[in-house]
Amino acid sequence: MYPVGVIGLGKMWIGLGVSVALLALFLLTIDVRRMADALADANYIWVIPAVALYLVSVVFRTLRWRVLLLHLKPVSVTRLFPVVVVGYMANNILPMRLGELVRSYYVGEREGISKSAALATVFVERVLDALTLMIFIVVIALFIPLGGVAEGFGERSGVAWPLLVIGATLPFVAIFGVMVAVARYPVAAQGVVNRIVRVLPGRVGGLASSLATTFILGLVPLKSARAIALLFFLSVPIWLFEASLFYMIGISFDLQSAVGGHDNLVVAVILVTAVANIGGSVPAAPGGIGLFELIARETLVLLPLGLVDRAVAGGYAAVVHAALLLPMILMGQGILWTDQVSLKRLWRSGRLAEETAEYTAKEAGNSDQ
């Protein structure tokens, strides 16, 4: 039996190990001196409007989350925005996307919302993001051949590119389909859960059934086609404004000269935004550090729009990621200081609730044997 906290510490060390390994791979596959030169030559004045546009993206994220939470409790954007920032801050510094747990716990404490239901809405967000980015890629593929990009990633990963594409897309489509089905037929879904947990010991089954009920409640917005359309409508500006950050920093590195103009740069950064965020969504390294840089760099290098030096692409990817991570970390910490709450307490409270449930389930199973 593992004491409460050991599992969380294990996740932490695994995430940090993944980050270190990926960052080492990033540096070993690039000319570090030339990347340093590219970083020194960049015009960082463009980072200021880039971060401003990214904050607009976060506002749209807050608007979308408000829609997802409406059936639980109407919460104003001004109340939700700090929670979103704190959640993203936690994701940026904690491994395994534990920031999702922190955000769900934080909004539950502040607004009196079911934490399990709030966590379900966060899962819906993640799937909506992936599907929206896939749509961006499909639209770009109608005008620019992307086969070389897929084949390049296949060669670098050692996985056949069709399998790579299927593995990066099919799970999100399947999960979204299941979520919609559960939202439309909650009674049937609860019945399936009840049949599954019936074979479990009494207290374990009761706990699982209760968690499933509140989780299903969080999926209610997906039962309406109109609500789904609104959620996708709000998802588009989220990613267009985030892609604007990629674009501004691209100008910092004069990438428009390498890809053949600003029009091509717009296309390039939207594709890099989509591929890097889908590929970097693996819940391991804190903030996707290492993985994001690798994927963003290679996407830019493999693009058929022009020849981008790998060292320049590496410097660009590093600055983009820093511009995405650091403002959220600083703002999130400022919000927690203002609220007199520590991230450590939020993380421990959310993790403790999760692990206590696991511990209770194990103890119930032992006592019923």
Image (cartoon, rainbow, N blue to C red):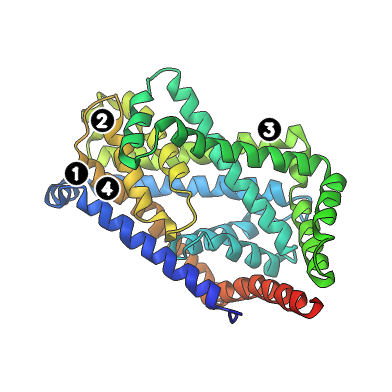
Q: Which of the two labelled residues, at mark 4 and mark 3, occupies the earlier sequence position?
A: 4
Binning the other alpha carbons within 10 Å of mark 3 as few (below 14), some (14 to 19) or many (20 upward) gives: few
Q: Is residue 93 left or right of residue 42?
A: right
The mark lying in front, picked from 4 and 3, is 3
Q: Is residue 114 left or right of residue 34?
A: right
Badge 3 amino acid: Ala
In the picture of the structure, the residue carrying the numbered disc 3 is: 229
Residue drawn 77% across the image and 63% down it: 208
Q: Secondary structure at mark 4?
A: helix
Binning the other alpha carbons within 10 Å of mark 4 as few (below 14), some (14 to 19) or many (20 upward) gives: few
Badge 1 amino acid: Ala
In the picture of the structure, the residue carrying the numbered disc 1 is: 311
- Rounded to the nearest angstrom, the CA distance separating label 4 from label 3 is 37 Å
Badge 4 amino acid: Ile
Question: Which mark is on residue 45?
Answer: 4
Badge 2 amino acid: Gln
Q: Secondary structure at mark 3?
A: helix
Residue drawn 73% across the image and 72% down it: 361
Q: Which of the two labelled residues, at mark 1 and mark 3, occupies the earlier sequence position?
A: 3
**Decide: marks 4, 3 in contact (CB < 8 A)?**
no
Of residue 213 and residue 246, the one placed in the foreground of this image is 213
Of residue 268 and residue 363, the one placed in the foreground of this image is 363
Task: Tell me residue 99's x, y (percent).
Answer: 54, 62
Task: Tell me residue 22's x, y (percent).
Answer: 32, 55
Q: Is residue 346 left or right of residue 15?
A: right
The mark lying in front, picked from 2 and 1, is 1
